[in-house]
Image: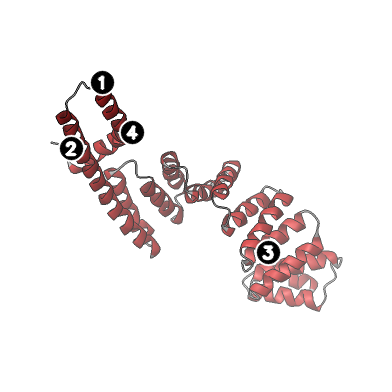
Amino acid sequence: MKSKNQSCYFLEAIYSTINDGFTKKIKMLTKKTIHSFTRIICLLTIFSAFLFMASSCRQSVKKYTENAKVLMSKGKFEEAIPILSTAIKKNSNSHEAYSLRGAAYLEIDKFEKAKKDLDKAIKLHKKDYRYFYNRAKAKKTLKEYQAAIEDYNKAIELNQSNADMYLERGQLFLTLNKGNESIKDLNQAVMLNASEKMAYFNRAEAHYLLHELKDAMTDLEKCLRLDEKFGKGHYRLAQISLEINKNKANRDICSHLKSAINGGCPEAKELINKVCR
C-alpha cells in the first residue's frame, strides 16, 4: 500500500493531465453516446475524489511552507531548510518550497545550493520575480555576472517598482566597468527610493568611472546627508576632492578623512597622515 507521501506524489503527477483532459473526454463520450449516463457519473465521482486528495496534499505542503516562512522571518534559516525539504518530498512540484529553500540557502551563503533550488522553482513557475531576483543574487556572488544580469533583467521585467533590483544591477554594471548602464539603473533606484544612501554612493562611483568628478562629489554629498557617519562615503569624498585639488589638502578634506576614520574606514589613516600633517 502506498504511503501518504507516495500518494501525494502520484496524485500531483497525474493531476494536471486529468484536469486538462477530463472535460474533453466527457464531451467525446457524450457526443459518441457510447457510454451511459451512469458511466459519466462514475467518472465524475472518481475525478472529484482525485481533486479532493490532491487538494489535501497541497494543503499539507502549505502547512510546511507557512511554518518555514515564520522561521525565516525570525532569521532561523537553517531551521527552515529541513522543513522545506519535507515539503518538497511531499510535493516535488511545489515551486514555492523550492524558492523558499533557495532563499534560505542564500541567507546562509550556500550559493550553489541556492541556485540549484531556484533553477527548479523557475522551471516550475516563471511568473514570480522573486525567483529570478534571488537567483541573480546567487549568480552575482558566484561571479556568474552575465547570467546574473539576465536574471535581473527578467526580475525587473516582471516587477518594475523594486528599487533594490535596480540598485543591485547598477552595482553589477559598475563591477563590469559599464558606467553609463550603471548610472541609468541607479537613477531609477533613486527615483523609486530617494532615501537609499548606497544608490547615491554607487552612482558617484559610476560618475567617477566616467571621469565626471563634480557629479561624483555631488552624489557623495547627498549620500552623506542621508548618513553622516558613513565612513566610506567620507573617504571617497576626500579622495576625489584631493584629485580635483591636485593633491593639496584643505580643512574640509582633512575633516572628511577624520570622519572616515571615526566611521570605521581604516584606509583613511594612511591618507590623513600623508596629506594632513
Quadrant of the snapshot with the C terminus: bottom right
Q: Which residue is mark 4?
A: 20
Which residue is rendered at x = 59% and y = 59% of the image? 163
Marking on residue 32: 1
- Circle nearer the viewer, 2 or 3: 2
Callout 4, which amino acid? Asp
Assign a secondary structure to mark 3. helix
Q: In terms of sequence position, does the residue under pointer 2 or pointer 4 come before the other?
A: 4
Q: Quadrant of residue 267?
A: bottom right
Callout 3, which amino acid? Tyr
Q: How many marks?
A: 4
Q: Quadrant of residue 225?
A: bottom right
Q: In terms of sequence position, does the residue under pointer 4 or pointer 1 come before the other?
A: 4
Callout 2, which amino acid? Thr
Marks 3 and 1, how far apart at CA: 70 Å
Give coordinates of residue 28: x percent, y percent: 28, 24
Q: Which residue is mark 2?
A: 45
Q: In terms of sequence position, does the residue under pointer 3 or pointer 1 come before the other?
A: 1
194, 101: nearer the viewer = 194
Marking on residue 200: 3
Asked if the residues shown at circle 2 and circle 4 are in contact, with their CB atoms under 8 angstroms apart, the answer is no
Assign a secondary structure to mark 1. helix
Marks 4 and 1, how far apart at CA: 20 Å
Residue 270 visible within the image: no
